[in-house]
Amino acid sequence: MVPDPTVPRVLRAVLRTLALAESLQRELARRHGVALADLNAMHTLARLGEVPISRYCANLGVPNSTATHVVDRLESAGFLERRLASTDRRVTLVSLTPAGLQAIEDTEFILRSELVTSVLAMGPEERTRLAQLLERLVGGSAAAASVGESRRPEVPKDIAQDHE
């Protein structure tokens, strides 16, 4: 079997991107004690405002059990609060605390990062294609994990062709 020559190139690019994201992760943890995924979850809640936890889960696009872990973690860190709705005590509402709002407003270091600067330097079509490929990458992983598939997906051949 002849190995696909695009695989090493793609893997190097993925690993380099992960390394750039890792530096952001470390700085975010140092400043606020949260991960990039938590910051994304906090941005989602900031956009929604105070909402029932079920709506928050739906907007995060994760199972309720995963969202509950996110809520627990963010509440424990002081970034999110939950309370029972006054109109229906069966409904739990979630909202950001002032500390949570401050953490999502402290994004200047992310905007100045090498990773974000490189993405913003791309043209709109390149950014759209990058978003599509990344969404396919993370969507494929989530879908495979949710149905218990253990096979390894093949690396799409068009990835290297798009950048040659």
Image (spheres, helix red, strand yellow):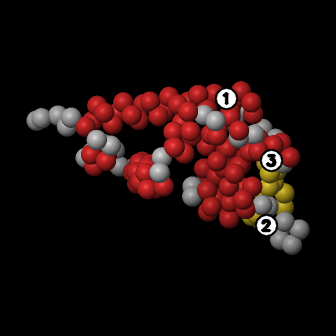
**Of marks 2 and 3, which one's residue comes earlier in the chain?**
2
Determine whether the residue tagged by mark 2 lies in a helix, strand or loop: loop
Question: Disc 1 residue type?
Answer: Glu
Q: Nearer the viewer, residue 151 or 97?
A: 97
Q: Nearer the viewer, residue 155 or 68?
A: 155
Where does residue 14 sit, x and y in percent of width and height? 41, 35
Residue 61 visible to the viewer: yes
When asked about the image quadrant of residue 44, the answer is: bottom right
Front disc: 2 or 1: 1
What residue is shown with label 3?
101
Q: Residue furthest bottom?
A: 87
- Is the N terminus in the top left, top right, bottom left or bottom right quadrant? top left
Q: Residue furthest right?
A: 86
- The label shown at residue 27 is 1
- Measured Cα–Cα span from mark 1 to mark 3: 17 Å
Residue pictured at 67% horizontal, 44% vertical: 39
- Is the C terminus in the top left, top right, bottom left or bottom right quadrant? top left
Q: Mark 1 and mark 2 in contact (Cβ < 8 Å)?
A: no
Above or below — where is 67 with respect to 3? below
- Measured Cα–Cα span from mark 2 to mark 1: 38 Å
Question: Disc 3 residue type?
Answer: Leu
3 displayed left or right of 41? left
When asked about the image quadrant of residue 8, the answer is: top left
Where does residue 37 sit, x and y in percent of width and height? 61, 43
Residue pictured at 89% horizontal, 68% vertical: 86
Residue pictured at 68% horizontal, 34% vertical: 109
- Local packing at callout 1 (Cα closer than 10 Å; few below 14, some 14-19, many 20+) is some
Determine whether the residue tagged by mark 3 lies in a helix, strand or loop: helix
Where does residue 131 sit, x and y in percent of width and height? 47, 52
Q: Residue furthest left?
A: 1
- The label shown at residue 126 is none
Question: Disc 2 residue type?
Answer: Arg
